[in-house]
Image (cartoon, grey):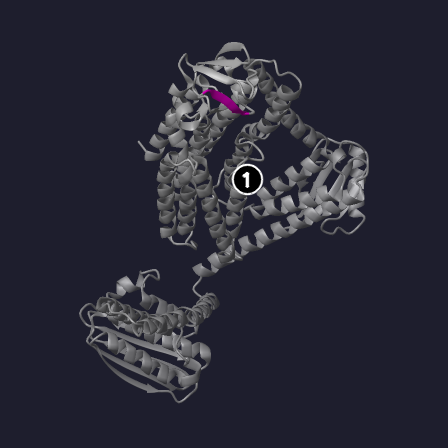
């Protein structure tokens, strides 16, 4: 079983166990102090606790906890608070009262803040984790993000137990609370490392893990020191972690300037900022500075719902993981309806009827939730039905033009363009029937049922005036738009309106615009189809010289561009790197091994420069127009002899200056012949003669290699370099004669007219 799946199952089990503990132990929320007489006195009551709901006041005396003296209870002894008790005996003046604490003692706020919200957040995080696991099962960054979501869900649930001083939940909360920032930074590093755009070292991530581990131990030790509280250690560490993460993400914004991944960093900053800002500003910092919060933690941590929501948004907008998927409409509406239903139920419970039981509130929430989903579905239906009456602003038509423009980019043929246009027109205009037709002179039948007289009047209008692309002709309920003439056949959009109302000006402008878009798209598609057919037919003919010539010239242009790019970028960067390495050698270092390694690196860089320069020479003959064809060929032969032990006898006599195209062709032919000798012929001796006479340039090539079967060469379909030589020569109206047989070398005579 996948480790991630196991982690999710374990997290679910732990979350269920923590929730059961939360239900069993309500938050009592009663801090106590021992007075001079040794009595245990209530000195603080928490707003959302059981004590406040049951009328316990400050200065009340605690006589017994679970039927025993208060100091025998571990939370009183360790933390000066009363939690996880079943019975509490209180004395106020002369009245003594024993109160029972059980799961029924949960108030509305406790059910909401300590059970419903944490469990809802955890289920949200698990749902997003399952979603990620299905779509990116083997992505390490997605796996780390899943761990982060599961941990933050467990942290939220265990926070409730931590407030109740349950030992298991408290230590789990402390550990997860401190490790979360490091896990988040680990995810960021993994994700951008995969994209090859990481801007901080991995050791920073592991350093943060180590720092938080040390601070976790410090939080455990802090229990022995009255001057330092456990909460202060945790909050200070969390604040330091947040500063580090925000600083690194800010650095990422600068590093990824003008890069599309900058949007991902902005999304991560948004997720961290919106989710952590209320907790940091209204709880964490005030506790650290003045020792008292502005808003309770229960309220501020609800903002952490933003975190998985922003992650979901980043995934849905293709800014994170670049996933291709579609979201079911019901799931989308259910997600949108949750928060309004929850807020309405919460406001009702707070201000209208606090006496309702939990089951009644759950039914109310479910009812509002379903109504919200249905309302969204009804809104969509009404939008489609009434959009022509509701949306008359120009913005509506501009949005449609943008939508159809994006949709037309994805269509592959004329039929798909027509279907796309038909769908858009039906959705935007109030029409009854619609059809794209190619009306011939001899056949002018209506494409759908309509009034015959009205149809003939429309035909007469079209015949009586010149048609231009996008021109609209109306006749009561019928209208026609000329799309264009394609392959000697006119294409028209014919429609029937539901009501005999003329189109408004903005509707005419919109319809003409999208028809013009469709016309251009169809025309370009047909031209591409015709061009491909022409290329295929030319390829089958024997006289396709111009096409072969065009392809070779195109290839040479791309090679020239690539050569310039390589020379101006890679080589220059490597030279700078070489100089940096040289400077390191003169620094004060006493490690000989380090100097040896640097020397090795320098030699490797020199080799890389030579290889890259050689590649540039092969892609583009060096200074061919400046030093001349003869000198370029000599350099080519010299480099060839440096690589292999082959004797080359060459004779070059050029009495006439060749044009650039023929100079490049001759150079490439010789280059290909030498490459063939290097890779295939196993020759030890080559004779090469190049000369001009009678307005021709002639190349003789002879080697003593293993030769080649001419029948194989004639049926190679362009897979061998020698076949490419033949095509190149023929593209210049030249001839190429090759004679060879196995074991008897290769003889080639190339003749090209000047």
- Work out which residue is located at the far left of the displayed protein and give it: 743
The answer to whether residue 659 is visible is yes
Q: Main secondary structure of the magenta part?
A: strand
Residue nearest the observer in this picture, 200 or 652: 200
- Work out which residue is located at the far front of the displayed protein and give it: 37
Q: Measured along the vertical axis of the image, is residue 301 above or below residue 347?
A: below
The answer to whether residue 373 is visible is no
Q: Measured along the vertical axis of the image, is residue 254 above or below residue 735?
A: above
Q: Measured along the vertical axis of the image, is residue 92 above or below residue 609?
A: above
Residue at x 30%, y 31% (from the top left corner): 1
Say left or right for 192 vs 474.
Answer: left
Say left or right for 448 vs 654.
Answer: right
Is residue 43 covered in magenta? yes
Residue nearest the observer in this picture, 5 or 725: 5
**Part of the protein shown in magenta:** 39-46
What is the quadrant of the C terminus in the image? bottom left
Residue 335: x %, y % from top left: 56, 30
Residue 13: x %, y % from top left: 37, 24
Residue nearest the observer in this picture, 180 or 55: 55
Question: For mark 1, does the 10 Å Cα neighbourhood hold few (<14), some (14 to 19), or many (20 or more) residues?
Answer: few
Say left or right for 487 vs 177.
Answer: right
- Residue that mark 1 sits on: 290
- Callout count: 1
Secondary structure, mark 1, is loop
Residue 515: x %, y % from top left: 69, 47
Residue at x 40%, y 43% (from the top left corner): 182
Residue 461: x %, y % from top left: 80, 44
Q: Measured along the vertical axis of the image, is residue 600 above or below residue 205?
A: below
- Where is residue 646, by image quadrant? bottom left
Is residue 396 covered in magenta? no
């Amino acid at each position: 079983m996948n480790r991630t799946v196991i982690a999710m199952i374990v997290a679910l089990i732990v979350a269920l166990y923590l929730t059961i503990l939360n239900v069993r132990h309500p938050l009592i929320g009663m801090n106590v102090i021992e007075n001079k007489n040794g009595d245990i006195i209530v000195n603080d009551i928490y707003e959302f606790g059981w004590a406040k709901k049951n009328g316990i006041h400050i200065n009340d005396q605690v006589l017994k906890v679970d039927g025993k003296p208060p100091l025998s209870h571990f939370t009183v002894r360790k933390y000066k608070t009363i939690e996880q008790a079943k019975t509490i005996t209180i004395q106020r003046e002369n009245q003594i009262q024993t109160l029972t604490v059980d799961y029924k003692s949960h108030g509305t706020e406790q059910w909401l803040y300590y059970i419903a919200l944490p469990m809802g957040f955890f289920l949200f995080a698990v749902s997003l984790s399952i979603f990620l696991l299905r779509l990116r099962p083997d992505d390490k960054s997605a796996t780390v993000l899943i761990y982060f979501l599961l941990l933050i869900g467990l942290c939220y649930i265990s926070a409730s137990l931590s407030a109740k001083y349950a030992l298991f939940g408290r230590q789990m909360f402390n550990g997860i609370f401190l490790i979360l920032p490091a896990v988040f930074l680990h995810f960021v590093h993994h994700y951008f490392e995969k994209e090859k755009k990481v801007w901080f070292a991995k050791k920073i991530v592991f350093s943060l893990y180590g720092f938080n581990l040390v601070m976790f131990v410090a939080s455990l030790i802090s229990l022995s020191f009255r001057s330092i509280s456990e909460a202060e250690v945790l909050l200070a560490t969390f604040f330091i972690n947040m500063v580090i993460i925000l600083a690194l993400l800010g650095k990422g914004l600068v590093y990824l300037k003008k890069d599309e991944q900058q949007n991902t960093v902005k999304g991560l900053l948004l997720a961290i900022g919106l989710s952590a800002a209320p907790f940091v500003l209204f709880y964490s910092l005030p506790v650290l500075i003045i020792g008292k919060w502005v808003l309770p933690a229960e309220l501020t941590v609800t903002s952490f719902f933003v975190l998985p929501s922003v992650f979901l948004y980043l995934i849905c907008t293709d800014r994170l993981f670049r996933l291709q998927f579609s979201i079911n409409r019901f799931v989308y509406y259910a997600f949108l309806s949750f928060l309004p239903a929850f807020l309405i139920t919460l406001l009702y419970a707070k201000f209208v009827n606090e006496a309702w039981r939990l089951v009644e509130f759950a039914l109310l929430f479910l009812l509002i939730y379903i109504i919200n989903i249905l309302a969204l579905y009804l809104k969509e239906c009404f939008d489609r039905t009434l959009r022509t009456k509701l949306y008359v602003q120009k913005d509506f038509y501009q949005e449609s033009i943008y939508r159809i423009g994006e949709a037309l980019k994805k269509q592959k043929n004329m039929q798909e363009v027509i279907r796309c246009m038909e769908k858009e027109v039906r959705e935007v205009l109030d029409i009854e029937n619609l059809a794209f037709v190619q009306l011939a002179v001899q056949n002018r039948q209506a494409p759908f049922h309509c009034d015959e007289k009205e149809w003939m009047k429309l035909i007469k209008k079209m015949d009586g005036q010149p048609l231009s692309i996008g021109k609209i002709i109306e006749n009561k309920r019928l209208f026609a738009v000329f799309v264009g003439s394609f392959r000697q056949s006119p294409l028209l959009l014919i429609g029937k309106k539901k009501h005999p109302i003329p189109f408004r000006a903005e509707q005419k402008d919109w319809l003409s615009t999208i028809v013009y878009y469709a016309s251009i798209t169809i025309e370009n598609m047909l031209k591409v189809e015709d061009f491909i057919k022409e290329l295929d037919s030319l390829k089958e003919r024997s006289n396709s010289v111009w096409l072969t010539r065009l392809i070779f010239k195109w290839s040479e242009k791309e090679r020239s561009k690539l050569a310039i790019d390589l020379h101006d970028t890679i080589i220059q960067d490597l030279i700078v790197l070489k100089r940096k390495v040289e400077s390191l050698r003169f620094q004060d270092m006493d490690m000989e091994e380090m100097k040896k390694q640097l020397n090795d690196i320098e030699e490797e860089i020199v080799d890389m420069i030579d290889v890259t320069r050689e590649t540039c020479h092969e892609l583009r003959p060096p200074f061919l127009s400046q030093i001349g064809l003869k000198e370029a060929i000599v350099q080519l032969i010299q480099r060839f002899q440096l690589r292999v032990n082959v004797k080359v006898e060459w004779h070059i006599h050029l009495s006439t200056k060749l044009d650039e195209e023929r100079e490049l062709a001759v150079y490439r032919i010789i280059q290909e012949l030498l490459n063939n000798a290097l890779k295939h012929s196993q020759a030890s001796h080559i004779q090469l003669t190049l000369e001009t006479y009678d307005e021709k340039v002639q190349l003789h090539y002879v080697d003593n290699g293993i030769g080649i079967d001419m029948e194989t060469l004639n049926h190679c379909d362009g897979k061998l370099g020698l076949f490419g030589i033949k095509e190149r020569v023929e593209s210049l109206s030249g001839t190429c004669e090759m004679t060879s047989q196995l074991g008897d070398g290769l003889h080639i005579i190339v003749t090209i007219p000047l």
